[in-house]
Amino acid sequence: MDIKLIQLQKHGDARGSLVSLEDQKNVPFTIRRVYYLFGTQPNVRRGLHAHKNLRQLVIVVRGSCRFLLDDGNEHIEIFLDNPAQGLLIESMMWREMYDFSEDCVLMVLADAHYDESDYIRSHEQFMESKR
Ligand code: T46
């Protein structure tokens, strides 16, 4: 499976670190929406869906969590704990997020506004669409 992890340039000095996100530069699409997840409770599994047509860049800006990505043929688990690394998630990819650290802040940049009709929330339906 082709998983794209984007290394984001970290501008660091004695004061600390800064990462800048610019569309069509280090973010490979036009950013139309930003959202973030925080305060996720222990043993919670989120996601459990795919998107028909949505590109997203996921950055764990604080703490850590795991992603399971499933393209219908194979699945892969990715551990994210680096605020200078973005995980690119393309359309038609089943995703699940879990093992959130207590302090985890997961920020997501998306190339489209929120649209519930873009979600495939049944894995069976996802597999059907992949066939
Ligand atoms: C994704 C993963 C990584 C909105 O009103 N606007 C939004 O932009 C979003 C993303 C969500 N919502 C509402 C819809 C639900 O009532 O917020 C509630 C929680 O959303 P959801 O259950 O879809 O959250 P997750 O964590 O399961 O999935 C989210 C994104 O929805 C999804 O696109 O790829 O994070």
Image: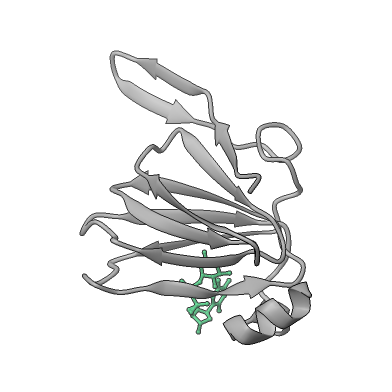
Q: How far across and down, in percent of the image, does residue 98 sit?
A: 35, 65
Answer with the quarter of the image where residue 75 lies: bottom right
* Along the line of sight, the residue nearer the viewer: 33 or 54: 54
Is 25 rendered above or below residue 54? above
Does the rendering let one see residue 121? no
Q: Quadrant of the C terminus?
A: bottom right
Which residue is drawn at the image coordinates 50% and 76% (left, top)?
A: 48
In this picture the colour scheme is one colour
Q: Quadrant of residue 52?
A: bottom right
Q: Which image quadrant is residue 102 in?
A: bottom left
Name the spot of residue 53 as percent of width and height, x first: 77, 67
Residue 11 place in picture, x, y as percent: 46, 20
Is 9 placed left or right of 102 in the picture? Answer: right
* Residue most extreme to the top: 14
Decide which of 119, 77 is in the foreground and name it.
Answer: 77
The percent coordinates of residue 29 (x first, y second) are 75, 46
Number of labelled discs? 0
Q: Is residue 55 left or right of residue 12?
A: right
The residue nearer to you, when weighing 107 against 48, is 48
Q: Residue at x 63, y 48 (%)?
A: 1
Q: Which residue is depicted at the point 72% across and 57% down?
A: 111
Query: Is residue 95 visible in the rendered structure shown here?
Result: yes
Report the side of 112 relative to 82 (left or right). Answer: right
Does 115 appear above or below 40? below
- Identify whether 19 is placed above or below 75: above
- Please tell me which residue is depicted at 42% across the width and 73% down the height of the picture: 46
